[in-house]
């Protein structure tokens, strides 16, 4: 039985046609995957379903009746909830308060809010769905993966008929992904429907009953997953064959650019030592919580190490802030675009140039001509899909926002580039472009540190792989020397096959 029908929906933003005559349907108890490159129109479609903005043309039907949501709250009241790709939590509040935000009256007696009731209800929800997080914990103390689980819990707490999941596994460990899979199967067994957006195409085959492919704002195909193969799905998405998933080039290595000696931070990471040469990509593999991001933040200056040495081109440097890191030749594309990357109130140009104003200032005045030129050049170089450099950053897809963050780092002409989860929430085509940027930058003599939770990506794009576990580097392998099974064993603290 059809629960949702989308009929010839179109949407325009400025001069950009985001959607063109899109039609598909969703049945009760099914998982419908939405696949497509960044900018293909998936998020725009979801925002229309949520009532964030109306379609320019077309109509929607929910349970056989016209569906015209006025806003996300109205959509919730009619039975549609969403897990957003970007985290939307209040760091200063507890886990329980974030799950039930806006519904405090449910835990009030005689007009007085009783926190223990909220905590008790949250624990019941977590126990029911296998979520292992304390309801009392402050959200600011959680990892990105744990925050993602809180978003998932909040979405299912509404007992919605349709749950939209936008890249829900992008920050999750394998164990947490299994919990999410169990949640999805339980929801569909209860007759609820799931709209599942993912750039991890294997998840389409693991979970979905049917798949809808978007490309350039058009719906390309809607079909059963059964009988579909990976090559055909990639071709539908990209409109072309994507043959070499990890196009790593063999590039001659130069002198040591970055050396890290005995870097330590209390209760976070310990005795971190490595070096990376000009033209080299050093990958970091590890489970969520292994300390990879924290080490990168310590090197860059976001959360400085307590002790140890950082040496750039033979010179010892001290990075107590990101500004010092940039000044000393180190740039970083952070893992969390929302909290540590984009400034949503600013446009594309200002987001891209935010970190290098001091380079284009004369007598305290920013050179607008230089800023415009550098922005336009970088947009072209990185193939950023945007209506213009003056478009608001929020109007771009997640993948194109990520390209803006890469552009921000490159405008500083760094000697060392740290890329922390650079392809998180990025489609197969944009991933290929980011890999090509890595090759291009390595050819130019840059030293690159690549952090990724996608082990095939780390192994496919790195010259060497450093394996981290519990805040320590437990092994460093030359390209091709170790199998994925051995690296996985090292990540879990098991004895790998030599």
Image (spheres, rainbow, N blue to C red):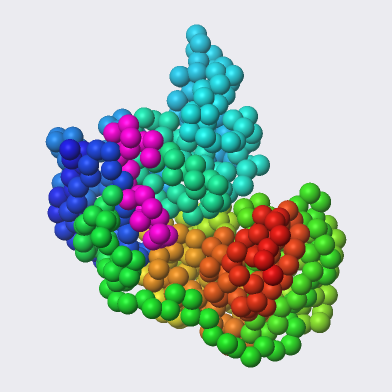
**Residue 103 at x, y = what percent?**
45, 25
The answer to whether residue 391 is left or right of residue 294 is left
**Residue 48 at x, y = what percent?**
27, 48
Q: Residue at x 66, y 42 (%)?
A: 141
Compare residues 227 and 340 and report the one nearer the observer.
Answer: 227
**In the picture shown, does residue 164 fall above or below 277?**
above
**In the picture shown, does residue 365 fall above or below 469?**
below
**Residue 214 at x, y = what percent?**
27, 62
> What span is colored magenta in the figure?
185-208
- Quadrant of the image occupied by residue 5: top left
The answer to whether residue 478 is left or right of residue 147 is right
Q: Residue at x 21, y 57 (%)?
A: 222
**In the picture shown, does residue 158 fall above or below 488?**
above
The answer to whether residue 218 is left or right of residue 302 is left
- Quadrant of the image occupied by residue 163: top left
Q: Residue at x 55, y 26 (%)?
A: 123
- Quadrant of the image occupied by residue 354: bottom right
Q: The N terminus is located in which quarter?
A: top left
**Residue 215 at x, y = what percent?**
27, 66
Q: Residue at x 53, y 68 (%)?
A: 456
Q: The C terminus is located in which quarter?
A: bottom right
Compare residues 487 and 218 and report the one nearer the observer.
Answer: 487
**Residue 344 part of the magenta-drawn span:** no
**Can you name the residue that lies furthest to the front here?**
497
Q: Is residue 408 visible?
A: no
**Residue 190 part of the magenta-drawn span:** yes
The answer to whether residue 23 is left or right of residue 240 is left
Q: How many marks?
A: 0
Q: Is residue 465 visible?
A: yes
């Amino acid at each position: 039985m059809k629960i949702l029908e989308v009929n010839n929906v179109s949407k325009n933003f400025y001069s950009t046609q985001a959607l063109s005559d899109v039609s598909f349907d969703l049945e009760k108890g099914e998982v419908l995957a939405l696949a497509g490159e960044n900018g293909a129109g998936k998020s725009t479609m979801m925002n229309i379903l949520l009532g964030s903005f109306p379609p320019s043309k077309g109509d929607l039907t929910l349970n056989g009746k016209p569906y015209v949501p006025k806003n996300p709250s109205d959509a919730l009241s009619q039975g549609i909830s969403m897990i957003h790709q970007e985290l939307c939590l209040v760091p200063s509040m507890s886990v329980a308060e974030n799950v039930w935000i806006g519904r405090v009256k449910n835990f009030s007696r005689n007009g007085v809010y009783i926190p223990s009731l909220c905590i008790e209800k949250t624990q019941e929800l977590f126990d029911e769905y296998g979520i292992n997080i304390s309801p009392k914990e402050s959200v600011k103390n959680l990892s990105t993966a744990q925050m993602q689980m809180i978003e998932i819990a909040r979405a299912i707490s509404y007992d919605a008929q349709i749950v939209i999941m936008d890249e829900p596994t992008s920050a999750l460990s394998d164990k947490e992904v299994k919990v999410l899979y169990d949640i999805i199967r339980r929801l569909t067994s209860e007759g609820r429907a799931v709209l599942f957006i993912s750039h991890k195409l294997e998840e389409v085959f693991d979970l979905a009953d049917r798949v809808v492919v978007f490309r350039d704002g058009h719906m390309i195909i809607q079909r059963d997953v059964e009988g579909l193969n990976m090559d055909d799905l990639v071709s539908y998405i990209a409109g072309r064959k994507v043959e070499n998933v990890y196009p790593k080039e063999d590039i001659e290595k130069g002198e040591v650019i970055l050396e890290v000696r005995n870097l330590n931070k209390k209760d976070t990471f310990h005795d971190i030592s490595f070096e990376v040469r000009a033209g080299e990509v050093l990958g970091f593999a590890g489970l969520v919580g292994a300390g990879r991001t924290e080490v990168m933040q310590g090197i860059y200056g976001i959360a400085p190490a307590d002790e140890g040495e950082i040496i750039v081109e033979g010179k010892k440097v001290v990075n107590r802030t990101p500004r010092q890191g940039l000044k000393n030749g180190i740039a970083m594309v952070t893992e969390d675009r929302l909290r540590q990357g984009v400034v949503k109130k600013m446009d594309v140009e200002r987001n891209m140039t935010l970190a290098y104003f001091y380079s284009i200032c004369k007598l305290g005045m920013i050179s607008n001509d230089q800023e415009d030129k550098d922005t336009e050049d970088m947009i072209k170089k990185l193939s950023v899909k945007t209506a213009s450099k003056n478009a608001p950053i929020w109007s771009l897809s997640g993948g194109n926002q990520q390209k803006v963050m890469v552009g921000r780092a490159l405008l500083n002409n760094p000697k060392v580039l740290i890329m922390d989860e650079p392809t998180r929430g990025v489609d197969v085509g944009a991933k290929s472009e980011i890999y090509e940027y890595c090759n291009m930058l390595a050819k130019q003599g840059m030293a690159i540190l690549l952090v990724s939770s996608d082990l095939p990506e780390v192994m496919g794009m790195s010259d060497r792989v450093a394996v981290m576990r519990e805040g320590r580097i437990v092994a460093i392998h030359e390209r091709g020397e170790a199998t994925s099974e051995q690296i996985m064993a090292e990540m879990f603290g098991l004895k790998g096959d030599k």
